[in-house]
Image: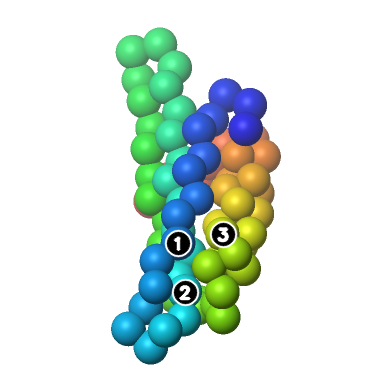
């Protein structure tokens, strides 16, 4: 997504639902930036979790300055 690499991921939880996460990476010059975002919300399907992760990654990459943790 532009100058960022956003990698969505899903995982099955012990109760059979699916969790979402994504990694957000940027490399520029001598510096790099990488964050992993995991969400507490669970979903009925892996596809729903993936769509949520992609959407959150898109929102993060469209911010002028990503928040620093």
SS at badge 2? strand
Packing grade of label 3 (10 A; few <14, some 14-19, many >=20) is: many
Give the distance between the C-alpha atoms of the residues marked 1 and 3, in whole angstroms: 6 Å
Q: Is residue 15 left or right of residue 51?
A: left
Image x and y of residue 53, in percent: 56, 57
In the rendered view, would you say 11 is above or below 36? Answer: below
Identify the mark nearer the N-term, 1 or 2: 1
Q: Closest to the observer: 68 or 23?
A: 23
**Residue at x 42%, y 22% (from the top left corner):** 27
Residue assigned mark 3: 50
SS at badge 3? helix
Residue 21 visible somewhere in the drawing: yes
Q: Are marks 1 and 2 in contact (CB under 8 Å)?
A: yes
Residue assigned mark 1: 10
Identify the mark nearer the N-term, 3 or 2: 2
Q: Closest to the observer: 48 or 2?
A: 48
Residue 39 visible somewhere in the drawing: no
Q: Is residue 52 left or right of residue 9?
A: right
**Residue at x 57%, y 48% (from the top left corner):** 57
Q: Are marks 1 and 3 in contact (CB under 8 Å)?
A: yes
Q: Closest to the observer: 40 or 18?
A: 18
Residue assigned mark 2: 18
SS at badge 1? strand
Image x and y of residue 65, in percent: 57, 37
């Amino acid at each position: 997504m532009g100058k960022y690499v956003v990698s969505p991921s899903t995982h099955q939880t012990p109760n059979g639902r699916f969790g979402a996460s994504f990694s957000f990476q940027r490399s520029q010059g001598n510096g790099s930036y990488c964050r992993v975002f995991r969400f507490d919300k669970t979903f009925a399907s892996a596809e729903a979790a993936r769509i949520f992760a992609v959407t959150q990654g898109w929102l993060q990459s469209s911010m002028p300055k990503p928040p620093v943790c």
